[in-house]
Structure formats: structure tokens, C-alpha cells
């Protein structure tokens, strides 16, 4: 039986949307850097890459094809972009694996990108029939997070405490250099606006780290933030994922082919699952996707050694963690999107690469990546870590 393994991973740093190092860099250019370096790290000849599958939410067009060409892949390498909202990067990895297992491909890149700075939309308009059927389908995600908090009694204090811990874990991981083998430096130009004259200029910058997190965050500071939707609500700028720009790429290969080439994979793709839920509480989608995934593979919650569940909002990731009974010590151990940001299409690919590398450090075997999805869905992917 064919098996898809991950032989390399590379990502950019996460830059602040609008104000950060990628505010003048296109989706395709950001992703092209990640793909180029992931392929270089794999040791694979670019000519051997059959396809590039990219998750992307905030741009029009086939970013995968354009980024592959910018990465130096040959014109014979194809590309396809997909959009399943916040799970797009994970979905891209799953599709790349399926391409290898089911269709006989040898080498495929699974990746994800988004520039919230340069988003081009992609909502697809509104159908009045769907509005009648599910009036909450287009509800802003901030409002769904508030609903989850209220409906399931996730207090503001509990959310802020979790958010502080995400910042703390992220800062500790940065100080320990745990991301240095993930991030590739990107030289680009950043747009700067003069505060007084409003004149715009371009300056040369190098994005070589995650620039969004706030190591000096305190519980007192979080408590002072006003809820986005007004008094009595829960979501603030401190307990929700930050808007950011970035890309991540993984090179997948058939296991026997990797062995033939003498490569040492990070791990293997084992499977993934999706599930739907009510649109007005889309954040709890992992509560439905994760059990479906584990049941298919004969596993239980306690069989998973490490979890990465995207921190779209503190309310939804806390509810999902507690409802499923996941040990906090195994959950988002180096912080998450509340600390460093969430470029929608990138995050699933970033979490996959990171959990494999962190899993190796911790001698984990089974690891899971999961996230909620706008519109009322959840996704989860299962991976086996190789020593």
C-alpha cells in the first residue's frame, strides 16, 4: 500500500497585516519563497515535483501555479489552489497526500498562504435562498465566537487567561529558538507611510521572524481591552487571532520513493476528516471533526501525544479542548494564532509542519492538527511522527 510522507517543511515569518514586512508583497511571491526553500530542503530535483496544491482564502486566481513558477519549479509542474476557509492549508496537505496515495504521484507540494494586507475577497456573493435557509451563514466570525462564549459559559476571564498563556508559550518557544529551523528569511520591500505627511515610500526589509506576538502581555492589560462588539461581549483584540501575512510549504513524497532516495521524512500523513455544525457556532467544528477522524483510525483522545488546534478565538479553542477532554499540557504547547497571527490559508500548513517538528523533539508518535472553519465546519488531520 502506498504511503505519503512529509520530507521537508519551510515557512516565512508571520508579518503584521498592513503594518508589517509583507505589506507590499503579493500572495504568489510570499508563497513562492516558502515553496522554493521547502523543495531545496527536501533535496528533491524541482523537475520531480508533479503538482503544487495551495490553500488560499484571501486572493483571486490560481496562486499555486504562479507561486510554483516563482519558486523556480519547471513549467511541467502543475498547480491548483483551494479554499476551505481556515482549513485550506491542511486541506492542501491532505489533497497532496491523496494525489500520492491514490493517483501514483511521486512528489507533490502541499502549502498555504494568505496576505490579509492584500486580500482580494473571494466570498462569492450571497444567494437569497441560502440566506432564508441559514440566516447565520454569513455571520461575522467574531459574532460566532461571542455566541460560543455565551452559549457555553466561556467567561471573558477564562479567555483572557488562555490568551496570556498562548503569548507566554510563544515567547518561550521563540526564546528557545524552536522556530529557527522552520522560518526562512525573505528579503522584500515594505511600504511605509509618513505619519505627518502621509507620503508613501518603500524600504528594504528582511522578514526572518514572527513579528506579531506580544511577550509583554499581562492579564491586567488584556482585561482592559474593550470587546469588539461592545459592552457585554467577549472577543477583544487580545483574545482572538491577529491579522497577519505569511506562507508555509511541505514537500510530500511516496514513502518507498523517499527510502530509495535515502531521505529521512519528518512523518507520515495518516488521514483527515471534516464535519459540519451550525454556522452561528462555527468555532466548535473541531468537536465534531476530531472524533470522526479518531474513530476511523481506531484511536482515542488520550492516544494523541500532541495537538495543534488553531486559535481563531479563545472561546472556541477553549470549548473544543475542554469538551473533548484534551490535556492542556499536550495542546498548542508553543502558543498559537492568538499570539502570532492567522493568515487564513497558511495556518493549516504551518501547524502541520510545526507539530511534526515539535513532535520529534518530544518523541511523540500520533499528532493531530485541527481547526474551526467559517460557515460552520471543522477539520482535523492525523499524522505519525518519525524519530
Image (cartoon, helix red, strand yellow):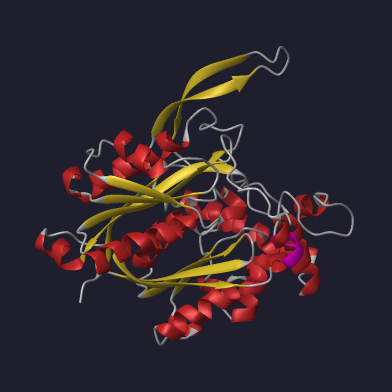
Q: For the view shown, which residue lies furthest in the front direction?
A: 129
Is residue 14 shown to the viewer in this render?
no
304 vs 372, left or right, is left
The relative height of residue 252 versus residue 331 in the rendered view (above or below) is above
Which sits in the foreground, 344 or 191?
344
The relative height of residue 244 versus residue 18 in the rendered view (above or below) is below
State the image coordinates of residue 289 (x, y, percent, origin top left): 53, 75
Quarter of the image where one finds residue 131: bottom right
Q: Which residues are magenta?
A: 130-136
State the image coordinates of residue 44 (x, y, percent, origin top left): 18, 49
Quarter of the image where one finds residue 363: bottom left
In percent of the image, x 56 and y 34: which residue is there?
118
Q: For the view shown, which residue lies furthest in the right direction?
A: 231
117 vs 78, left or right, is right
Which sits in the foreground, 359 or 229?
229
The relative height of residue 370 versus residue 37 in the rendered view (above or below) is below
46 vs 232, left or right, is left
- Would residue 180 be counted in the magenta stretch? no
Name the quarter where the C terminus is drawn.
bottom left
291 vs 233, left or right, is left
In percent of the image, x 55 and y 44: which residue is there?
58
Name the quarter where the N terminus is drawn.
bottom left
State the image coordinates of residue 56 (x, y, percent, origin top left): 48, 48
Is residue 62 shown to the viewer in this render?
yes
In percent of the image, x 48 and y 50: which residue is there?
346
State the image coordinates of residue 89 (x, y, percent, origin top left): 45, 55
Amino acid at each position: 500500500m502506498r504511503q505519503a510522507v512529509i520530507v521537508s517543511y519551510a515557512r516565512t515569518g508571520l508579518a503584521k497585516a498592513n503594518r508589517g514586512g509583507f505589506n507590499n508583497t503579493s500572495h504568489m511571491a510570499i508563497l513562492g519563497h516558502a515553496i522554493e526553500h521547502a523543495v531545496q530542503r527536501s533535496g528533491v530535483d524541482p523537475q520531480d515535483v508533479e503538482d503544487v496544491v495551495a490553500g488560499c482564502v484571501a486572493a483571486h486566481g490560481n496562486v499555486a501555479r504562479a507561486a510554483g513558477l516563482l519558486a523556480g519549479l519547471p513549467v511541467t509542474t502543475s498547480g491548483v489552489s483551494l479554499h476551505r476557509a481556515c482549513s485550506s492549508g491542511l486541506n492542501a496537505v491532505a489533497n497532496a497526500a491523496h494525489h500520492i496515495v491514490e493517483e501514483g504521484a511521486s512528489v507533490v507540494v502541499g502549502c498555504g498562504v494568505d496576505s490579509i494586507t492584500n486580500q482580494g475577497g473571494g466570498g462569492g456573493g450571497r444567494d437569497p435562498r441560502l440566506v432564508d435557509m441559514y440566516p447565520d451563514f454569513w455571520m461575522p466570525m467574531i459574532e460566532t465566537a461571542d455566541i460560543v462564549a455565551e452559549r457555553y459559559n466561556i467567561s471573558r476571564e477564562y479567555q483572557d487567561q488562555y490568551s496570556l498563556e498562548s503569548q507566554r508559550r510563544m515567547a518561550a518557544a521563540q526564546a528557545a529558538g524552536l522556530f529557527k529551523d522552520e522560518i526562512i528569511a525573505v528579503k522584500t520591500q515594505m511600504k511605509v507611510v509618513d505619519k505627518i505627511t502621509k507620503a508613501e515610500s518603500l524600504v528594504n526589509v528582511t522578514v526572518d521572524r514572527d513579528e506579531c506576538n506580544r511577550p509583554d502581555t499581562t492579564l491586567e492589560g488584556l482585561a482592559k481591552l474593550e470587546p469588539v462588539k461592545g459592552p457585554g461581549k467577549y472577543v477583544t483584540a487580545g483574545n482572538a487571532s491577529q491579522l497577519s501575512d505569511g506562507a508555509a510549504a511541505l514537500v510530500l513524497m511516496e514513502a518507498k520513493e523517499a527510502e530509495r532516495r535515502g531521505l529521512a521524512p519528518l512523518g507520515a500523513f495518516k488521514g483527515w476528516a471534516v464535519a459540519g455544525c451550525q454556522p452561528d457556532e462555527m468555532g466548535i467544528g473541531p468537536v465534531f471533526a476530531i472524533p470522526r477522524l479518531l474513530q476511523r483510525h481506531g484511536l482515542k483522545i488520550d492516544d494523541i501525544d500532541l495537538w495543534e488546534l488553531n486559535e481563531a478565538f479563545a472561546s472556541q479553542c477553549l470549548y473544543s479542548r475542554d469538551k473533548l477532554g484534551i490535556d492542556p499540557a499536550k495542546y498548542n504547547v508553543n502558543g498559537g494564532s492568538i499570539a502570532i497571527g492567522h493568515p487564513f490559508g497558511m495556518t493549516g500548513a504551518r501547524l502541520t509542519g510545526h507539530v511534526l517538528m515539535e513532535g520529534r523533539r518530544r518523541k511523540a508518535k500520533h499528532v493531530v492538527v485541527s481547526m474551526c472553519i467559517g460557515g460552520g465546519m471543522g477539520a482535523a488531520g492525523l499524522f505519525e511522527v518519525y524519530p
